[in-house]
Image (cartoon, rainbow, N blue to C red):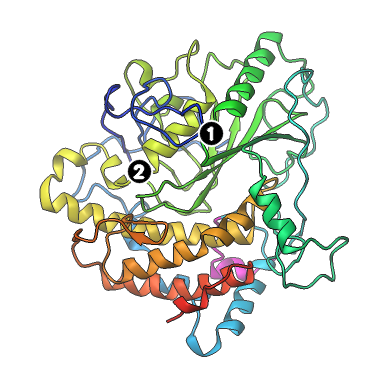
Amino acid sequence: MDVEIEEISAQDDSVKVKDNKKAMTEDNPDTVAGSTSGSTDSGNNNSSNSDISYHEDQNDGDDGLDDCDDMSNYDDDDEDYMYYDDEDDECDYLSMQAQLDNVDLPAGVEATVSWLNEPAPSSKVSSQASSSSHLAGAQTLNPTLPEHASSCFAQVSTSSSSLVSGGSNSHLKEEVTEDDLMKKYQSFKHFDVVENFSDHHYSNLGVQGQQPPKAWSKKVQDEWKILENDLPDTIYVRVYEARMDLLRAVIIGPQGTPYHDGLFVFDVLFPQNYPDVPPMVYYYSGGLRLNPNLYDCGKVCLSLLNTWTGKGNERWMPNSSTMLQVLVSIQALILNSKPFFNEPGYEASYAGPEGQRRSNSYNEDAFVLSLKTMTYTLRRPPKHFEELVIGHFRCHAVDILSACEAYIEGAPVGSVVKGIVQDLSATAEKSSSTFRESVSRMKNGLISLFTKNGANDCDRFRV
């Protein structure tokens, strides 16, 4: 499915990272560049093992959405395993946990019935302490690469007191108190250098046992410095001491969008001819298509990555484009408040009330899938981000549940910021009964999951 975003004015809609590391403002065309879309002719494939062909006809059919892309086609029956009956929430929660514990899946993957028929043993890990960030001296890559294991994130049990309090400590070597956990979360670095890259999507690609060119190494180190100094508060990055060509980022969904309070995971590869070509970026979708520009195969459509057409500095410019621009552009241009209009031509084709109705419906579907992604990201945090994930959902559980409640009662999706509806006069077309029922049931499941994770004051939201 082809999607795009209308060219963004360099004066009005571009974004930059403030010096004090706050979120983006709208006056710097050098930080956020490029349009976003779901189609490409470029050789920059975001998935290392898939060659995807895309539709040429952008407006074929009434909706321009095909069966596999239309999020409104999700089936509530497939979601019942993660919903909870009021009479026995604890039993149902343990049932869901047992299902997820027995499958080896990446963050965000739905445990469908077919997967549950063939369970695989899970591996449990505790969070790893990251090494200190040193940018000099890392001139060579690891000459011996491990076999590329599944890019699944290792599971972290929410009952383990190594990450959360109140759980079993039978598998612990060292008990970590709740205060210790929150201190680690509060001190979690936005940028750091770590060691273990075994679960990285691109760990079997890149330079293998070769001495990288000095110019390449210097450019990557320059990227590290920019990221270390200028990342906004809502983006976190880990790079790898033994594999300078790899990077992992976690982006917090922006407030005012259907993705608010969610965590979205991306793996990055700096190719051998970088920066002559843009980095390769893979999104951990878990099979969920929650945005026109984030494919369920992991592809990220952004003109700055040369995965969509663009003009001028919208496309990758070897002498000036940076990895920071890519991350901020994903957050600002893809995870936006009206992703329906990312579709090519939709802003013109669906103007007025009809366009707003379709946009509201798309936001509802995106929010449901974002809740699912939260569930699995919390159950299976990405390596090196365990403390961030656990702490984030502890601190934001009440905000997320408050938003669920407000949306069920009719507030437009994306209008709730930190648990409060921002525009009380805002009116939206009545949400669908499917959406209200889905969010209501998922809310009860999230209450149990957030409570197990150590969040307080969640039971008051139970229906």
Q: Residues within 10 Å of mark 1 (few under 14, many from 20)?
A: many
Question: On screen, 344 above or below 446?
Answer: above
Residue identified by numbered label 1:
281
Element at label 1: strand
Does residue 386 appear anywhere in the picture? no
Residue at the farthest bottom position: 87
Q: Where residue 304 sits: x, y (%)? A: 42, 25
Residue identified by numbered label 2:
336
The amino acid type, in three-letter code, at marker 1 is: Val
Locate residue 367: give its quadrant.
Answer: bottom left
Residue at coordinates 50% horizontally, 10% vertically from top-left? Answer: 319
Residue at coordinates 48% horizontally, 86% vertically from top-left? Answer: 86
Q: Where residue 347 sits: x, y (%)? A: 19, 40
Q: Which residues are magenta?
A: 108-120
Task: Name the quadrant of the N terminus.
Answer: top left
Question: On screen, 237 above or below 405?
Answer: above
Element at label 2: loop
Tell me how far mark 2 sits from mark 1, CA to CA.
19 Å
Question: On screen, 443 above or below 424?
Answer: below
Residue at coordinates 48% horizontally, 18% vertically from top-left? Answer: 321
